[in-house]
Amino acid sequence: MFYLDFLAGLHERLAPRTYLEIGVEYGHSLALSRCRSIGIDPDAHVGQLGPDTSLVSSTSDDYFAELGRRDRTPFGALPIDLAYIDGMHHFEFVLRDFIGVERYATRTSVVVFDDIFPRNLDEAARVRHTQAWTGDVFRLPRALKVNRPDLRQIKVKTEPTGTLLVVRLDPSSRVLTERLDDIVREFVEPDPQPVPAEVFRRTGAVSARKALALELWDELRAARDHDAPD
């Protein structure tokens, strides 16, 4: 299944109230949302937006820093129900993006990452020299497993380069923030990237159809509706 088709299916299954996207580019994924949405990209090329969608021309680092300075949240009283991270394809950037998103999420939120399965060493390079490029995002699942075993990860065999879903978020956790520099030193390596064989084989990943059929999405929706204020 193509990754945009999978993301559209996830929107339908989860029915989020809010959606935040990092890395908008031409707006193809942002256009899938049917709820209050924010897209973050310093150089997006998007036409007309829907009435409930806003575009922030900023890097994600600057966006989250500004929220912190102003003591604001992306959606007021509502948390981020669904986030899609597809910005700068360097490990340290996607890790910081996750830290920023989780701070404004809840236990019922879902974070989606693109590009966890490079198809060859060229796509996995930190220095981009190909049209299709994943960078070293493939390192994120291992880093989260080591440092945040409380999170649940679901790897999905979407085309062309895979998708990662992360649930059971904990906005009170500061583990990744406190360990950030050490994690980056441990996981970032110079090119050429030593990509494990299991990444190329997509070991442990499920099909997109199986992922969309999980009862988990019904459970998260029910828990979210139960906790929603009257």
Image: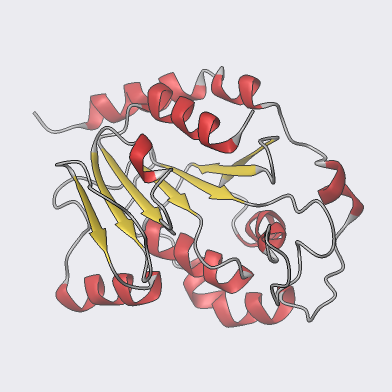
Residue beneath the point at 58% across and 37% down: 3
Residue 7 percent location from the top left of the image: 49, 34
What is the x, y in percent for residue 64? Answer: 32, 70
Task: Locate residue 60 relative to residue 188 in the image: left or right.
Answer: left
Residue furthest left in the image: 230
Residue drawn 19% across the image and 32% down it: 228
Up/down of 164 relative to 103, above or below: above
The C terminus, quarter of image: top left
Question: What residue is shown at x 39% (from left), y 75% (from top)?
Answer: 61
Residue 69 falls left or right of residue 197: left
In x, y percent, where is residue 180? Answer: 55, 76
| Quarter location, residue 35 | top left
The N terminus lies in which quarter of the figure? top right
Q: Quadrant of residue 138?
A: bottom right
Who is closer to the viewer here, 49 or 120? Answer: 49
Q: In percent of the image, x 41 and y 53: which residue is there?
A: 26
Residue nearer the viewer, 101 or 43: 43
